[in-house]
Amino acid sequence: MEVILLERVEKLGGIGDVVNVKNGFARNYLLPNKKALRANESNRKVFEANRAKIEADNADRRTDAEKAAKGVDGKTVKLIRQASNTGQLYGSVSARDIVEALEAEGAKVTKSQVVLDRPIKNIGVHDVKVALHPEVAVTVKVNVARSPEEADLQAQGVDVLAQMFEEEAAPAAEELAPEAVEEAAPAEVAAPAEASEPTETAEDEQ
């Protein structure tokens, strides 16, 4: 389906571009979210008649987003979650969780602005993109840990999982290491018994 973009869409184009997209993408995302119009003759005329206003409104929103970006870009939020010894979460961290954590830090964003290809399912420090505007995106760090202390270590750049595996491997290595064999003192070899001199018998005396 051919559509006219009403704002910049990543990997597609900018305002006024006519692009060909999959029907499902157009019907389920671009058209209902007013990011595009069907590229028919009627809509082309409507777009050209309102192009100046569309571009001016977009510029205003971009300016607002750039101001908001200063309070969001580079922020780090901590999320404490239960996880297994391998770092896999019992559950996951969603865009909603990140929005709530950012709001607690005084940064207001919406769920739709958090670009999360898939939920976070393991501990660690994750870089998450936040698109405040089609032309303004920032990055926040999401520190997912099993405890505040673990989160602090991760914030310092410590790989807690690698550290944990090393600590677990050390005792195992000691158990597997061959025990030092004490040098046994050479066994004393018993001296051969001296042959006893033959005893004279009565027959010899005769």
Image (tube, rainbow, N blue to C red):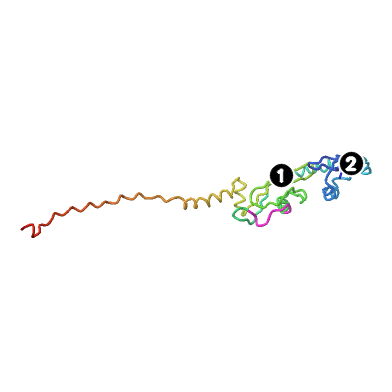
Q: Is residue 42 left or right of residue 173?
A: right
Q: Is residue 163 left or right of residue 55?
A: left
* Vertical position of residue 78 compared to residue 15: above or below: below
- The secondary element bearing badge 1 is classed as strand
Please state which of residues 135 and 202 is positioned toward the viewer in this rendering.
Answer: 202
- The secondary element bearing badge 2 is classed as helix
Q: How many marks?
A: 2
Please state which of residues 65 and 180 is positioned toward the viewer in this rendering.
Answer: 180
Task: Indicate the quadrant where residue 45 lies.
Answer: top right
Residue 102 position in % (x across, y down):
72, 50
User: Mark 1, residues whose alpha carbon is within 10 Å: few (<14), some, or many (≥20)?
Assistant: some
Q: Quadrant of the N terminus?
A: top right
Amino acid type indicated by mark 1: Thr
Q: Is residue 19 left or right of residue 158?
A: right
Residue span colored magenta: 88-96
Give the Cα distance between marks 2 and 1: 30 Å
Outermost residue to the left: 206
Task: Write the residue at 26% across / 51% down.
Answer: 189
Residue 147 position in % (x across, y down):
61, 54
Q: Quadrant of the C terminus?
A: bottom left
Does the stretch in magenta take in 39? no
Task: Write the residue at 68% across / 51% down.
Answer: 120
Task: Write the residue at 36% across / 50% down.
Answer: 182
Residue annotated with mark 2: 53
Image disc number at residue 139: 1
Q: Earlier in the sequence, mark 2 or mark 1?
A: 2
- Tag 2–tag 1 contact (CB < 8 Å): no
User: Mark 2, residues whose alpha carbon is within 10 Å: few (<14), some, or many (≥20)?
Assistant: few
Specify the principal SS of the magenta part: strand
Residue 202 position in % (x across, y down):
8, 60
Outermost residue to the bottom: 202
Amino acid type indicated by mark 2: Lys
